[in-house]
Image: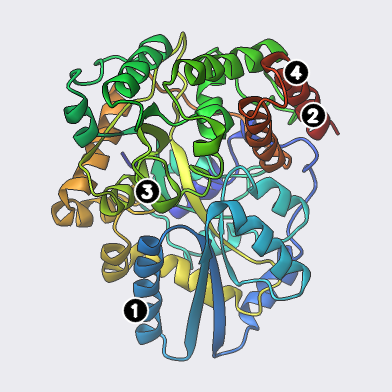
């Protein structure tokens, strides 16, 4: 999965390439510190102190993260790193509040849909020099994964792992339904048919599928399978009102047939990324679509056996290798060097690598992958097997366009529109028109 390259190749090929990910409106922007000013700030930091890390995730992620913080403190007793986590839905609201109140965390878990807006506000540290001088050693890191995380060809966060979109399903419920295993090659039509049959076979007490009409991960898959991307290179939406209408109509039809839940069941679920917030772990649905690196956490939380397959396919490949999350550094931190040292620690220290395992995605370091492989649980091995299956398939293509600063707002808009339609306050056509118009406005300069 990884390709080794030297630190000078990072500058020549990685940090100075991938023009396709340049972002409209960000040309000329940089972090609050740049050039000599940034280097001096890094070298002049305090020799001891307490840092804070903020991330989203589950109790499993919290436990694993704290293990690395303890390991780092033992190796660097002058520094203590505390941590706090939230569900994904609340995370960026909490982060923004901390930044506004001058209590910004030093280490920030960042998502590719949101990174551009923080870069635009100059709130994330440019990591170029720290990578070049190997404070953060990426000498055997996967360049494709690193390239996929850049803004204006600059690294503002190190991908903590890679993943693909994945469809999880409850094997126990499928066995109970007695209608046979899912079709080997799911299309959107066969997925709907199978989900409807599952609901009927389970007596209407468990629904075949989550209602994914408000899920941006699945919506992006749908749009890419139509040969498009959600956004164009100028940061504007790149889908039509017809695309949105077809999307909402698909789920409305399935909802009417009973294949996915009504709003009274679905609302508020499958939005935080935490297993206990999901319809599948709560026993309300058989299928959900999310990201492959979450499979272990979902299996741990579920009382039933789960499995994972590729999502329904379309006319063109839609899946792509995604940076599961980034580890960024706040541009105004008093501890830039320690923050970078911690990033390097979890990427390259054997004990830290083992502690984190692949809960945040398959590591980008070839050495880390080699180290972890013989230690992985059967669930983790299933994630790697799934990643390999996707890579060998014809269902994935590279994502060449970075999400614009408004991507987070578009994601929220999609969910709110889906609730309006499923709740009966808007028809499919009204919802599609509203979503398209407001998404266009959000992404217009």
Find numbered disc 3 in the image and state the secondary structure of the residue it sits on: loop
Pointer 3: what residue? Answer: 361
- What residue sits 60% from the left and 22% below the top? 229
Which of the two residues, 6 or 171, is positioned nearer the viewer here?
Answer: 171
Residue corresponding to mark 4: 430
Secondary structure at badge 4 equals helix
User: Residue at horizontal 67%, vertical 16%?
Assistant: 428
Image location (x, y in percent) of residue 159: 47, 51
* Image mark for residue 438: 2
CB under 8 Å between discs 1 and 4: no
Q: Earlier in the sequence, mark 4 or mark 3?
A: 3
Q: Is residue 424 in sight in this rendering?
A: yes
Above-or-below relation of 344 to 157:
below
Q: Residue at x 55, y 49 (%)?
A: 11
Question: Residue 424 appears in which quarter of the rendering?
Answer: top right
In which image quadrant can residue 23 be found?
A: top right
Total marks in image: 4
Viewer can see residue 4: no
Quick one: label 2 or label 4, which is nearer the N terminus?
4
Q: How far apart are marks 2 and 4 (CA)?
A: 12 Å
For mark 3, does the 10 Å Cα neighbourhood hold few (<14), some (14 to 19), or many (20 or more) residues? many
Q: Is mark 1 on a helix, strand or loop?
A: helix
């Amino acid at each position: 999965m990884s390709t080794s390259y030297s630190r000078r190749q990072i500058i020549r090929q990685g940090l100075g390439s991938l023009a396709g990910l340049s972002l409209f409106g960000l040309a000329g922007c940089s972090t609050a510190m740049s050039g000599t000013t940034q280097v001096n700030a890094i070298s002049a930091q305090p020799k001891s102190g307490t840092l804070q890390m903020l991330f989203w995730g589950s109790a499993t992620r919290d436990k694993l993260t704290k293990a690395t913080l303890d390991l780092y403190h033992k190796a660097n007793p002058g520094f203590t790193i505390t941590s706090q986590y939230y569900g994904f839905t609340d995370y960026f609201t909490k982060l923004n509040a901390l930044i506004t109140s001058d209590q910004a965390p030093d280490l920030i878990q960042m998502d590719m849909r949101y990174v551009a807006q923080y870069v635009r506000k100059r709130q994330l540290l440019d990591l170029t020099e720290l990578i070049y001088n190997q404070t953060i050693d990426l000498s055997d890191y996967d360049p494709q994964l690193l390239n996929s995380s850049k803004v204006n060809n600059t690294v503002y966060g190190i991908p903590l792992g890679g993943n693909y979109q994945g469809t999880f399903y409850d094997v126990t419920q499928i066995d109970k339904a007695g209608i046979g295993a899912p079709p080997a090659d799911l299309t959107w039509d066969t997925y709907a048919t199978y989900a409807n049959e599952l609901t009927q076979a389970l007596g209407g007490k468990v629904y075949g599928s989550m209602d994914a009409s408000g899920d941006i991960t699945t919506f992006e898959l749908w749009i890419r399978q139509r040969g498009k991307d959600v956004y164009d290179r100028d940061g504007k939406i790149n889908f039509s009102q017809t695309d949105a209408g077809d999307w909402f109509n698909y789920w409305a039809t399935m909802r009417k047939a009973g294949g996915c839940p009504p709003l009274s069941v679905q609302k508020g679920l499958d939005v935080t990324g935490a297993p206990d917030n999901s319809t599948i772990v709560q026993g309300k649905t058989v299928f959900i679509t999310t990201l492959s690196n979450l499979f272990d956490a979902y299996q741990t939380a579920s009382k039933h056996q789960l499995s994972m397959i590729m999502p329904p396919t379309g006319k063109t490949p839609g899946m792509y290798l995604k940076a599961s999350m980034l580890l960024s550094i706040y541009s105004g931190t008093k501890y830039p060097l320690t923050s970078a040292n911690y990033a390097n620690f979890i990427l390259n220290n054997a004990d830290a690598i083992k502690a984190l395992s692949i809960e945040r995605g398959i590591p980008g370091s070839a050495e880390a992958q080699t180290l972890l492989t013989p230690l992985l649980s059967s669930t983790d091995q299933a994630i790697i097997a799934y990643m390999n299956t996707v890579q060998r398939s014809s269902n994935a293509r590279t994502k060449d366009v970075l999400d614009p600063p408004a991507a987070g707002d578009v994601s929220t808009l999609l969910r709110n529109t889906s609730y309006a339609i499923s709740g009966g306050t808007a028809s499919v056509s009204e919802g599609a028109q509203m979503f398209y118009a407001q998404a266009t406005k959000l992404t217009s300069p």
